[in-house]
Amino acid sequence: MAVDYVHGYSERESRRLDDQAGTLAALLHRGTSYPAGSRVLEVGCGVGAQTVHLVGSSPGARITAVDVSAESLALAREKVAVRHPGAEVDWCHADLFDLPFPEASFDHLFVCFVLEHLPDPARALGILRRLLRPGGTVTVIEGDHGSVLLHPDSAHARAAVDCLVRLQAAAGGDALLGRRLEPLLTGAGYTGVAVRPRTVYADRTVPDLVKGFTRDTFTAMVESVREEALAAGLTTGADWDRGIAGLHRTAEDGGTFLYTFFKAVAVNPPGGGAAPA
Amino acid sequence: MAVDYVHGYSERESRRLDDQAGTLAALLHRGTSYPAGSRVLEVGCGVGAQTVHLVGSSPGARITAVDVSAESLALAREKVAVRHPGAEVDWCHADLFDLPFPEASFDHLFVCFVLEHLPDPARALGILRRLLRPGGTVTVIEGDHGSVLLHPDSAHARAAVDCLVRLQAAAGGDALLGRRLEPLLTGAGYTGVAVRPRTVYADRTVPDLVKGFTRDTFTAMVESVREEALAAGLTTGADWDRGIAGLHRTAEDGGTFLYTFFKAVAVNPPGGGAAPA
């Protein structure tokens, strides 16, 4: 893929993705369990943050995990080996737009936090659909940074989040993709599309979530693009620091933080190998 | 109360509140059911949009419903009589800040879409707490217009929503109150505060929700303040119309709409009649 991966590939970033998956696993993976023997493809597994939960929730499924980064794939393999010793996952180093699988190779696709990084998510969904047997399902999970709600509210904090949105757009992605999962899936020829919000809300009465999500996941993600935001001239050091301070205030006593993920499940229609009209 | 009620008292508005309560009842009232014989006070029952659901979910509870508007109260009484013939509700015409009940008169309080209209919601929660027996609960439900997420996004639509937020603020209220329920309740001396988001998401795959919520509830609510927004100089006729058109587009095929309500439950601490520190 020609696009930059906005979150980078640092070790700190790998830890952040781990924290995120651990805290959010129950929320995001609820309802996702594949039957024993079914063929499941995880597209864009990255460092395996979601793969470990897939393996845990669907112990008998035959999981294949693919990623464009060999380095991430190695980390993912290591993580699954540690968390689920003996679990068999087929690891595949390949580009999403050039996957080495025949048509209808899989019963289920799992695509989490991937479309947001692609310049043409509609095309990706169409290509992926061909890998599904007729009647097979796709599950897509995406965030949407426009859903952030802060208390106390902070224009600087919102501007810092917007820097991330703009950097991701400049890299060819869309950090506001969650809200358009339904038209994307329907447009790519899937049927039975069902999108549901998965909303995270954190205040001092749920301190683990404040730490695990508000601070170590979302705020850390925004903080990680500081240098890029400054280099791109999107903010000044002082404004950026005010923005980050504003995000941290929502994690203090009396602060609150809200974020909505979107989870979609859809079906490759029986006999529906044709491209959508 | 000295404040204007931003939604007005027209018959059309009464129908809108009915639509809203019907569509959202399952989402908002889920988990709220009071034991037979328990004394429940609904504060600010308005035209009874929520009262009918309270009566339905807690058939044996002894419900008292209070409102500052005698006209609304009459409509509420009529609505309950139609939907739940024979149900006994004590109707009380009074100001929230001057309620004719002794301390500890109630086991449970229910306060839905009321705090958003008050200039001092913290004081209201403190006053109401005295009406609760020690160990009694309060349930508060509020929206937050900052949570609106539109696809396709529309700056004009967001500006129209912001007109409503500003009009409500000018009337002494706060249409962004949902996000601060936790600090408000904790600050008013309640304990065991638990706030959970109740998120509504609508797209063409759930047409009843598109009609009942996106169109007939939210968009209708914004549309209803057109004249006030123009009179206050917050917008122009052309910009307003573009904004409303933008909201309607989210209800068309391929559009999506997201809104988050906040539902809080909290306890009047045993032996905790004292004012908070």
Image: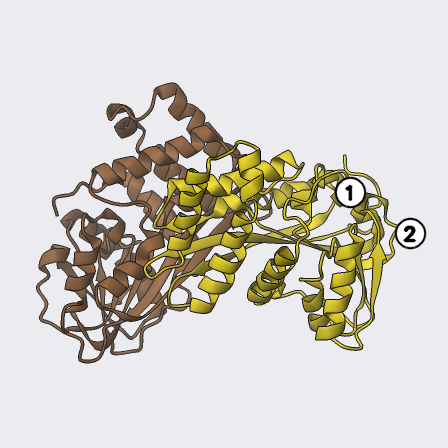
Chain colours: A yellow, B brown
Chain at tag 1 = A
Chain at tag 2 = A
Residue in the picture at 14% in, 50% down: B70
On residue A102, the disc is 2
Instruction: Using the image, determine if residue A9 lies above or below residue B238.
Output: below
Provide residue B213's location: percent of width, then percent of height. 44, 46
Residue in the picture at 74% in, 63% down: A76
Of the residues under marks 2 and 1, which one precedes in the sequence?
Answer: 2
Provide residue A144's location: percent of width, then percent of height. 55, 46
Q: Is residue A165 visible?
A: no
The residue tagged with tag 1: helix, strand or loop?
Answer: helix
- Residue B238's quadrant in the figure? top left
State left or right for residue A111 relative to residue B83: right
Q: Amino acid at mark 1?
A: Gly
Give the camera-side residue of A163 and B155.
A163
Provide residue A21's location: percent of width, then percent of height. 61, 63
Provide residue B35's location: percent of width, then percent of height. 31, 77
